[in-house]
Image: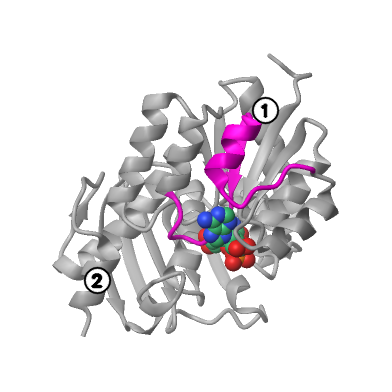
Amino acid sequence: MNSQKTYTVAIAGLGKRGLHHAEAFAQNPRFALVGLCDIDPARMTAAAQQLGVSYTHPDAAQMLTDTRPNVFVFCTLPTIRLEFIQAGVTAGVQLIAYEKPMATSTNEALAITQLLRENGTRSVVSLQHRYGEHYQKVKEIIASGAIGRVHTVYGHATGWMMHMMPHLVDYVRWYNDNVAAEWVVGQAAGKEKFGDVHASPDYVAGLIHFANGVRGIVECGEGAPDVPEVDYWWRKCRIGAQGTEGFAEVLTGGGWRAITRDSNGVISGPGGMDYAHDMTPYVQQIADWLDDPAQVHPCNGESALKGFEIMMAICRSAVQRGKVTLPLGPGEPELEALERALP
Ligand SMILES: NC(=O)c1ccc[n+]([C@@H]2O[C@H](COP(=O)([O-])OP(=O)(O)OC[C@H]3O[C@@H](n4cnc5c(N)ncnc54)[C@H](O)[C@@H]3O)[C@@H](O)[C@H]2O)c1
């Protein structure tokens, strides 16, 4: 245990999520911000002033060379992943914390994983909605056995795939105790969103067969069911589990609800996705994992890979028209193949 150590942190990408990370690390006494990086000088200067950090540089690799942090955080758009993982590994950081989606293809995700494994570098991926009180309550109800034997886990979101599906799949896996997925079948429609910075089919759906026999059902994008209780598009997610004696589900922007063996009708409670709330334990558990290798972070990169593979397998299935078994090996980049295959 190393509970008194202060871990140094350098952050690249200071947009919306970079600032969330910077503020959460700055508020935790176990961390000290030692470097900030953005290719946008105005953003970089503003963040440095706000957070009282004296070192800034527009080049992430140079920042890492100059500051040699324990933790490298990057919050760039999805196309910048492998090169920053490489930069972090080269600089010898202990842990890299970065944003979802973990990659834009299976090939990239496997290359990232290999680099991290070979160098013994830990990683976490920001799938932090799980810290919401409503997400936790649903997990607690399912784990207590109050809905009986779980046979189905499900998640849908009106936001498009590269935004929302990493979240959906991760929490669906969690509600099924992170049991391995064996195969998926998927379908997709629409090409408009391939031009977006989160390049995706407009709509995508997948069935997941988990090793314990539980069925996963996920869908997102235009055509996924609305969640009328919630007003803002990316909070319109419904994620939960059905069992032999009831169900429990979370609405990202609208609390939780359940029927259990003993509830005598619907029970419900509060909760709404809140970045400041969720980032606090996410960051604390990074300190806990650095202190003690046995306290593996729930958002660890190996777990994120399992979820990412499910999402990419759904895309492969939409191209190949059949079951895709997991784990995945390298192959044609999924998004390019899917864009070409869709009418
Ligand atoms: N976990 C969540 O809840 C959540 C929520 C929103 C977004 N995200 C993810 O966070 C990531 C970033 O999203 P955002 O909304 O913060 O984007 P953003 O556009 O607000 O910020 C990205 C920042 O990266 C900077 N940048 C680009 N290239 C760079 C480079 N080479 N070096 C340094 N900085 C560079 C940009 O100038 C910008 O300031 C995306 O992958 C997105 O999917 C996650």
- Taking the image as shown, residue 311 lies to the left or right of residue 322, namely right
Report the span colored magenta.
54-81
Magenta residue check for 55: yes
Which residue: 46% across, 71% down? Answer: 197
- Dot 2 amino acid type: Leu
Q: Where residue 66 sits in the image (x, y, percent)?
A: 63, 34
> Would you place residue 33 above or below residue 119 in this image?
below
Residue 288 is tagged as 1
Q: 41 or 325, which is in the foreground? A: 41
Q: Quadrant of the N terminus?
A: top right
> Would you place residue 251 above or below residue 285 in this image?
below
Q: 148 or 66, which is in the foreground? A: 66
Q: Quadrant of the C terminus?
A: bottom left
Residue 338 is tagged as 2
Q: Where residue 74 sits in the image (x, y, percent)?
A: 57, 49
Q: Residue 281 lies in what quarter of the image?
A: top right
